[in-house]
Image (cartoon, grey):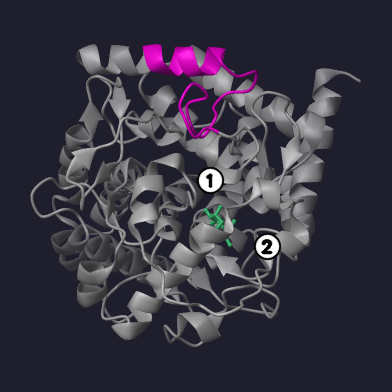
Amino acid sequence: MSTAAADAKLRDAAAAVLAQNERGGYTVPTAGLYPMQFNWDSAFAALGFAALPDSAVAADFPAERGWRELENIAAAQKADGMLPHIIFRGDYGGYFPGPDIWQAGGAPPTSGISNPPVAALAAATLRRKKPLADKGRYRRLLRALAKWHKWLADCLHPLHNFFVAAHPWETGRDNLCDWDAAMRRIRPRDHGDYTRSDTRFVDAAQRPSRAEYDGFLEIIAVGRDTAWQQKTFRQQTPFKMGDPGITAILAAAADALDEMLGEENMAEELEWTRGIGARAREGLAFLWNEAAGGYVAYDVEAGEHLDGISSAAFLAPLAGIFEGEKHKKLMAEFDRIAAAAKYTMPSYDPAAAGFEAKRYWRGPVWLPFNLLIALGFARAGETARAGQIAEASLRLARDAGFYEYFCPHSGAGLGGAPFTWTAAAALVFLQWESWEK
Ligand code: 2M8
């Protein structure tokens, strides 16, 4: 098969995944394992819709499909501005932990924590590719995103300005090795004899451990005890983690949002968001670890930088930080890690203790994360490295299918499938050369 024919086949297959996982205005990550709406998954889905060729849009999707995805994230906004990480729409009955455990309110019910703010990046892309004709709807969405960013800015560390995650699930990288020490300090109460749903769908060896789930549930219980009063919850949570992932994404998203708000002359909203991008960049700069040669997590309780290099270290260019000696060092780390794996970019350094090639966020390659890294690299003029990521991502999707994540050594597909954000990222990578970054 010619390359063009193989690309067309992959594109049609990716579009079919978006169609299959669509539930009427929102797209589930994958049926069974994650049967409801997730915040940053939906934002990646919106990027996928932005990348659909017009022929596919006309055939299967209304042009505003991506906008509806974002509007349905925004519709779950809490009074304080938070956009929750899960919105329990549709038939979520099989998922654990459900709304009965979260008790975080909402109609439909939601979780009590937030998620990496990819939505404004998706909105900026959609605005270029498939602008929303209805200005009222567009401005309402921007206003909701501005409120959310303001809320996220309130969760920046008061001195150092990095984002402090209150739960591993907030970072989206649930069982990253960097969380281990903090998770081990948690002394969970008895959460009874609960049954996880994830291991019904995926081999337990590819998922977080039972001890980690006890910790996840404990943090939820702390939130419940505070009736999800966010200020109190964030003081009382046993997990307070400076996350380079959310910090870098927030910096990039804040810039994108400010540009859209500026175009629309939305003065009040611009007032809310003033300085957020700069503060997040300051926070990311604080997370630099010279010995490690990268941007790392910061354990707030322990008061220390960690020394592991996760894939989030490479989001600094996306945040607009790509100059001088630090950038050179970071690129050297990228090359070292890329050379240690057959497929770029493992979620955690394969040379580090704790790395596991097949266990979820402890090593596997994730295509949506690859997309964010590659977009930043392209912006920084790291064209070859960005191309290397695009190429590896397409190889994985082509050879293994649209899996949730992949083994960086064998390329085997892992976790759930067919997965929305993998298909969405592939749709962008298929147009990488011509894609406006
Ligand atoms: C995973 O997280 C959820 C909990 O939030 C789970 O394991 O049940 C993570 O990979 C997260 O980043 C993602 O948004 C979610 C749905 O794909 O699954």
Q: Is residue 402 visible?
A: yes
Relative horizontal placement of residue 96, taking residue 276 as reference (left or right): right
| Residue drawn at x 31%, y 48% as measured from the top left | 250
Q: Quadrant of residue 324?
A: top left
Q: Can you tell which mark lies on residue 129?
A: 1
Task: Tell me which amino acid carries mark 1.
Answer: Lys
Instruction: Identify the element where label 1 is drawn.
Output: helix
> Closest to the observer: 94 or 132?
94
Judge whether 190 appears above or below 408 on screen.
below
Q: Is residue 109 visible?
A: no
Q: Is residue 350 magenta?
A: yes
Q: Can you tell which mark lies on residue 414?
A: none
Looking at marks 1 and 2 on the same chain, the residue that comes earlier in the sequence is marked by 1
Q: Is mark 2 within 8 Å of ligand 1?
A: yes
| Residue drawn at x 42%, y 83% as measured from the top left | 104
Relative horizontal placement of residue 244, taking residue 107 as reference (left or right): left
Quarter the C terminus occupies = top left
Q: Is residue 349 magenta?
A: yes
Image location (x, y in percent) of residue 423: 69, 44
> Closest to the observer: 366 or 189?
189
| Residue drawn at x 73%, y 34% as measured from the top left | 397
Task: Tell me which amino acid carries mark 2.
Answer: Asp
Q: Residues within 10 Å of mark 1 (few under 14, many from 20)?
A: some
Residue for badge 2 = 198
Q: Please give the range of residues in magenta.
A: 332-355
Judge whether 291 appears above or below 29 on screen.
above
